[in-house]
Amino acid sequence: MSLRSNVARSAESSLIQVIPTGKALGAEVCNVDLRSFDDWAFASFMRALLKHQVLIVRGQRLNERDIAAFSRRFGHADLLYTSPGTMLGDGMSFCSLYAAYDALSPALRSRVAHLKIRYLTTDTADDGRRTTIAGPVHPLVGLHSDTGRSMLALGQRRHSYVVGLEQDESDALLDDLWQLAERPEFTWAHNCRAGDLLVWDTRCTIHRREPTDMPTLRHSPPLWNALPIA
């Protein structure tokens, strides 16, 4: 690598300060104003997100236009912002799908390597009639498109099944995988405060929100959510 490239990379990485949580995922980005992020600062932010999966930025004063502009710069990420003046924000819990995959026993890793999962959704017509729709099939083990790391591709637990397995066998396997993913050592929880902005990579995390009645600007559903289906 050239001296010029080294200098550029060093300057870029110094634009933001990142402090890991010490958990399987999560880090705090310090002393930044997201409204003034240029391309270099955003590139540093994205590298931190790919490494830590979830980032918290405190002390931000953003309006809906600021949030929309910042969110448009991402591909596979969700945001949650707690407005200034909020007394008590949402509680958020995140699980690392990298860590869950890495913790699989050799036998279980071999078993899930070539399995596929399908999710069922329900569509409600104007007259109230509900129709169950089978969604696309995708691998139970995925590769992150940016990092190349293997991860469990878990979505919502309800209305999902492993293709090719009997229902009881599918339920038992998915229950085991979910229990593994939700183990405390693979999770990080955060209670949002006024001015907090949370950003997480939806491809390699699952999350759960414990809502309050306080106003927030959110860009995600209030259930466990994970890898988008391609």
Image: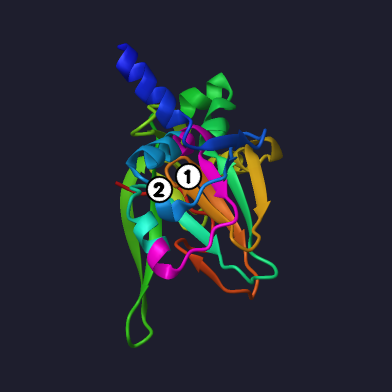
Please give the residue where the numbered disc 2 appears in the rendered image. Answer: 37
Q: Is residue 168 visible?
A: no
Residue positioned 48% across, 44% down in the render: 154
Q: Is residue 138 magenta?
A: no
The residue located at (57%, 74%) in the rendering is: 215
Q: Residue furthest bottom?
A: 127
Camera-nearest residue between 136 and 30: 30
Q: Secondary structure at mark 2?
A: loop
Quarter of the figure with the N terminus: top left
Marks 1 and 2, Cα distance to the nearest angstrom? 33 Å
Q: Secondary structure at mark 1?
A: loop
Horizontally, is 217 left or right of 187 in the view? left
User: Which residue is located at x 35 percent, y 49 percent?
Assistant: 74
Q: Which comes before the other along the chain, label 1 or label 2?
A: 2
Q: Is 65 covered by the magenta stretch?
A: yes
- Please state the extent of the stretch shown in magenta in the rendering: 48-66
Residue flagged by tag 1: what amino acid is it?
Leu
> How far across and down, in percent of the image, does residue 195 sit?
59, 61
